[in-house]
Amino acid sequence: MLYDLGMVPVVEPFARLLNQGMVQMNGSAMSKSKGNLVRLSEQLDQHGVDAIRLTMAFAGPPEDDIDWADVSPAGSARFLARAWRLAGDVTSPVTGTDVSTGDPGLRRSTHRTLHEVIGLVEAFRFNVAVARAMELVNVTRKAIDGDVGGADPAVREAVEAVAIILSLFAPYTAEDMWARLGHQPAVALAGWPAIDEALLVEDTVTCVVQVQGKVRDRLDVAPSIAEAQLRELALNSPAVQKAMAGRDVRTVIVRAPKLVNIVPA
């Protein structure tokens, strides 16, 4: 109709259709006759709108059915409280903070999360995007409670990133976090943070070392490690030498940088 009226230039203005799944209870559709209704108003009063919204996003892919008996609004509320507390632990100033001087490990986690969430949201994988936000909250909490501390510029960068990501799913909590961080409203207008491509490059990868197909060791190595060097590291591993029990090596299969399989003679 809009095309016929000359209001849009294309016949079909939508590129694709996403059909949302049904929210069930105890394995079947909710109905009064079955007595398996979940009253939304009661859930909102008990847990808050952000927790309910986050629970729906985290339950699974939006096109799948979910069973309300299997999800945890209380768990979502606890997570949001943990994220909110992070904002109160940031002690670096709002302006004049050079984030490039912050903890490199935490900065890598922040930028990789921001980079990954973009693709996840565009692919409607909201549940995985929420999981990445939860992981970033955990990493940031450890940094604050550990040697990094709340004054590190990387902590402010990480918590601001958490607030911006949560603004997609839990806008009230995100806005409160944004205010606690010293910013003016609204977090939804803050824009997506610039991503430092250099921080997306892995410094190390984990190489699995097997002896006759059984995992015996894991080595953290550079992504560009040469096969000969990786082979030498694997053969010199104390765990590998113990597994070999003095036997000679027949074959070493090297798939640098992530796998070495040693076959005894």
Image (tube, helix red, strand yellow):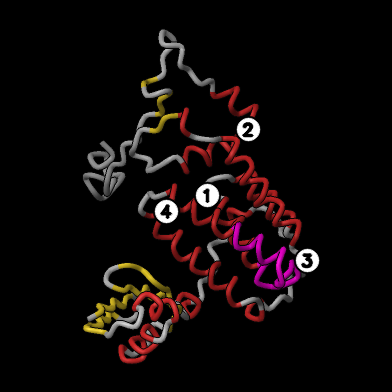
Query: Which one is nearer the viewer's eye here, 204 or 11?
Result: 204
The residue wearing badge 2 is 47
| Contact? badges 1 and 4 (CB < 8 Å) | yes
Mark 4, residue position = 121
What is the CA distance from the residue labelled 1 to the residue labelled 3?
A: 25 Å
Tell me the number on the disc at residue 145: none
Q: Where is residue 50 in the image (x, y as percent from the top left)?
A: 59, 39
Residue located beneath label 1 in the image: 168
Side of 115 relative to 166 (left or right): left
- The amino acid sitting under disc 4 is Val
Secondary structure, magenta segment, majority class? helix
In three-dimensional space, the C-alpha distance between marks 4 and 2, rounded to whole angstroms, equals 25 Å
Determine the residue located farthest toward the front in the rendered image. 246
Q: Is mark 2 on a helix, strand or loop?
A: helix
Q: Which of marks 2 and 3 is nearer the N terminus?
A: 2
Distance from disc 1 to disc 4, alpha carbons, whole Å, reads 9 Å
Could you tell me which residue is drawn at 51 percent across and 38 percent down? 55
The image shows residue 73 at horizontal and vertical percentages of 56, 35
49, above or below 264, in the image: above
- Name the image quarter holding the C terminus: bottom left
Q: Which amino acid does label 1 sit on?
A: Leu
The answer to whether residue 242 is magenta is no
Q: What element carries label 3?
A: loop
Query: Residue at 58% across / 41% down in the picture?
Result: 76
- Position of residue 193 in the picture relative to residue 81 (left or right): left
Amino acid type at circle 2 is His
Magenta range is 137-156
